[in-house]
Amino acid sequence: MTASIDRPALPYAPLPDRGLFPDRGLPHPALAAGDPELAALITAEERLQADTLRLIPSENYVSSAVLEATGTVLTNKYSEGYPGRRYYEGQQNIDPVETLAVDRAKAVFGAEHANVQPYSGSPANLAVYLAFAEPGDAVMGMALPMGGHLTHGWGVSATGAWFRGVQYGVRADTGLIDFDQVRDIARRERPKIIFCGGTAVPRTIDFAAFAEIAREVDAVLVADIAHIAGLVAGGAHPSPFPHADVVSTTTHKTLRGPRGAMLLSRASHAKPLDKAVFPGLQGGPHNHTTAAIAVALREAAQPSFRDYAHAVVANAKALAAALLDRGFDLVSGGTDNHLILMDLTPTEVPGKVAAKALDRAGIVVNHNTVPYDPRKPFDPSGIRIGTPALTSRGLGTEHMPLVADWIDRGVTAARSGDEDALAAVREEVTDLMAAHPAPGLSLAR
Ligand code: DSN
């Protein structure tokens, strides 16, 4: 007997079967019935993600399978501890879920040890401090305005308040890391931990060069690959192993998983890291997230993910070339990965003004400082763009001149205040997005 379910009338229709991206049926029927106000907001967000060109390099579209795993009964469980060593009973299914995620993480990244419990990137990095440094110790990372991350010892972060953050940067003339400077600072300051990686680094990270310096000063080298984890998994960026002692990563950027994080390491560092995550910093792991990480890692192990990772880089290079053709100034002159940092100083349009105008044109970017930025972080000179999300929608190098043209028209319209020009771009963007449905979304246009 088939149960009949009374579904409330919804303001949207289900999509037809999408093959690779299966239709999930009526979106959120229980939520629409139980909390229409919230359902409407989520539906509006789905609409926004469907219709806009999302260029924020730390964002992506997860698959329907990853999305489903995050919305399961696994959210109902407490599981403090690790598989086989829990403080709660009833872990018959949770232990294998976490073990699957750990084993897949080790296989995908070639790591001896994996901890999949950190709630996100910042707690993962904090666990590294707890494992390998004492308050007041020197820790070294790339300065935030140069492309680093808050948690690499920057002053306003707890990591900069509780530890003595010393920072390296990029050369003003090349936009590239100056390893002579990194070595000089490391020899002088003797940091306990050295972070490499960041949030606005458009070039390949030379893990071997960092490892040589870390070894010389007896520091733990941490590769924060949050941005490039998917590229590493897909062979489109060199692996941090065997150079890094610890690898920290979020799971939701190029890796295309749920919002979460992992710490990967040599076996010799497993104990202090595990102890730092739990009980050092966290309580119960988010099992629904762990399951979705496992699903994402299974996807990342498929040959198609290699294609995806290489396509992300090919798209970014093609987009950078098209922007350079139009006279834009790119930090370091281009990109090796998924990310492009545009210095808009020559256009006389501040980054924030450009970002807001592009948003009105249906192109989502974030304003960003550029190295040696004379402007303030909340009103900087640049914008940061990237290709992970558009590549997940199947856009290819052939589309990148058009994307560059839209950005060019958007920045020009921002300067002249031409709202009609922005509206025209928005219409073109919406049309192209409709022709390239995103994974995980269930809305019809
Ligand atoms: N906020 C992330 C990003 O956008 O790069 C880094 O934590």
Image: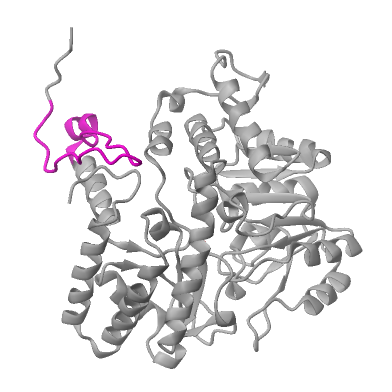
Relative to 398, residue 245 above or below = above
In reply to whether residue 393 is colored magenta, the answer given is: no
Whole-percent x, y for residue 20 in the image: 35, 41
In this view of the protein, which residue sits in the foreground, 296 or 143? 296
Q: Residue furthest left?
A: 9
In this view of the protein, which residue sits in the foreground, 81 or 112? 112
In this view of the protein, which residue sits in the foreground, 96 or 351? 96
Q: Residue at x 60, y 28 (%)?
A: 100
Relative to 356, residue 292 above or below = above
In this view of the protein, which residue sits in the foreground, 290 or 19? 19
The quadrant the N terminus occupies is top left
Q: Residue at x 57, y 45 (%)?
A: 261
Give the left or right position of residue 352, taking residue 261 as reference. Answer: left
In the image, which residues are magenta? 7-36
Whole-percent x, y for residue 237 in the image: 63, 59
Residue 220 in view here = yes
Q: Residue at x 42, y 63 (%)?
A: 56
Instruction: Identify the image quadrant of residue 101.
Output: top right
Whole-percent x, y for residue 55 in the image: 40, 65
Relative to 4, residue 171 above or below = below
Figure label count: 0
Q: Residue at x 23, y 33 (%)?
A: 25
Give the left or right position of residue 273, taking residue 227 as reference. Answer: right
Give the left or right position of residue 121, taking residue 413 as reference. Answer: right
Picture colour scheme: one colour
